[in-house]
Amino acid sequence: MSAMTTDFIADQNRARLADHREDFDALARKLARRGLDPETLVKEAMAFAVAIPSWGVGTGGTRFARFPGPGEPRNVFDKLADCGVINALTRLTPTVSPHFPWDKVKDYAELREAAKSLGLAFDAVNSNTFQDQAGQPLSYKFGSLTHTDKAVREQAIAHNIECVEIGRALGSKALTVWIGDGSNFAGQSSLTRAFDRYLESTAAIYRALPDDWRMLLEHKLFEPAFYSTVISDWGSSCLAAQHLGPKAQCLVDLGHHAPTVNIEQIVARLARFGKLGGFHFNDSKYGDDDLDAASVSPFRLYLVFHELAEATRSIGSSFAPAYMIDQSHNVTDPIESLMQSAIEIARAHAQARLVDAEALAAAQEANDALTAHRLLKAGFLTDVSPLIAEARLRAGGALDPIATYRASGYRAAAARERPAVAAGSAGIV
Ligand code: LRH
Ligand code: MN
């Protein structure tokens, strides 16, 4: 399948250049009137990046069913090819977050080379002790790192350490640990002993981490457990990360909270105590819906990036959470959804840079609630589409990634090359 060439992208941009130039110049004048420097903002937008989940380029599903689309990736190499297209068009996604054993191969040097040839590198690796693999000696039905049986815990610890070894071969610098461990009945498990087993098991994984690595603990309110989840909220995750040590931090998956939770305040708290390690961006209305970022609550995503901008101002450049997407694309072309989501996340980041932080702090100190709210919202109310498009253009990307992707015929070519996958099997991937 032909890669998405810069010539093709330039061809597609040509017809859109004049309109873009006009829109960008108008926005630049508006930003300059606010005392902002458009060039600095474009450079910041060019430096922004978010990682693609390898499991996100295939069609996702639910517990009821999965309806595969045309040209489904057959293996991790197809997934990388699709990730390469997303980055070629958006210039926002130079890294991929892999998941094991879903992305398992014999030769990880070959996989690293394959990614490199597509202009990609690897972000945090994800372990998986929420499914039983064929031939796996012990089942995770009743848990993994917190299972009452030491042998099961050791099996899960060994898998995580294997993921660290794979990650080292791929050039990754972090391990994301999400476990579904929990219970479905009150009394089924000891809530305290389960947490103590989590601390003991993660401590064993922590000891295997290279010095320059991070371990990202991902909390989730519920599912697959429906009465209690061992790491159900940021409090449990932060207590564990503080207990483990400086290399352990918390990962915030936006969909892992009850609908009314103030996630931006969780972000502020974790950043304040040096425990904000990263994100899984997506959106949700009810549960862990894994919908496209900013497709339900763009203002909430903006408020998260406002707290990230505040933390960057107070902590400085050492503040570097891992930005990653984690979504399930059940009814759209995953490549289109991931491009759209990366752009919406870059939009929230760029908008948050527009806030007059000094004036906002003054209004907050003066308890001028409405002025403070208006100063904060001013970024969200600014259409930065021309600014993030300019960042793409200067980086060799597409002014309109989705239109350019559709014009390329990439999906049709993938469908010709990759055998159709039968519908029917349930599950998120
Ligand atoms: C759990 C989760 C986790 C991944 C999985 C694919 O809901 O968010 O981050 O391992 O989705
Ligand atoms: Mn996640």
Image: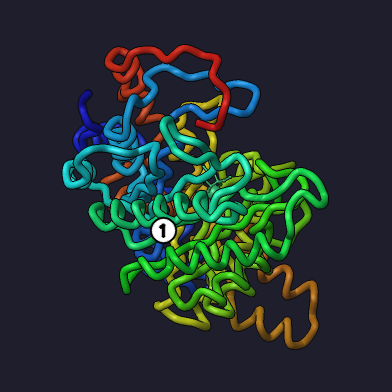
Left or right of 355: which side holds 223?
A: right
Quadrant hosting residue 372: bottom right
Q: Nearer the viewer, residue 42 or 273?
A: 273
> Visible in this render: residue 106?
yes
Dot 1 alpha-carbon crowd within 10 angstroms: few under 14, some 14 to 19, many 20 or more: many
**Residue 358, image x and y in percent?**
60, 83
Image position, residue 9 (x, y; %): 27, 35
In the image: residue 170, left or right of residue 338: left
Image point 26% across, 37% down: which residue?
105
> Tell me, what colour scheme is on the image?
rainbow
Q: Amino acid at mark 1?
A: Leu
* Position of the N terminus by quadrant: top left
Answer whether residue 347 is visible to the viewer in this image. no
Q: Residue at x 33, y 48 (%)?
A: 91
Which residue is at the far right?
186
The total of numbered circles placed on residues is 1
Q: Position of residue 367 (x, y in %)?
A: 80, 83
Left or right relative to 402: residue 82: left
Is residue 90 positioned above or below 275 on the image?
Answer: above
Residue 309: image x %, image y %?
A: 53, 71
Residue assigned mark 1: 175
In the picture shown, does residue 66 fall above or below 37? above
Residue lying at 64% horizontally and 74% vertically, measured from the top left: 269
Q: Which residue appears at 56% of the width and 28% of the height? A: 427
Residue closer to the observer: 40 or 241: 241
Under circle 1, the secondary element is: strand
- Classify mark 1 as within 8 Å of ligand 1 or not, answering yes or no: no
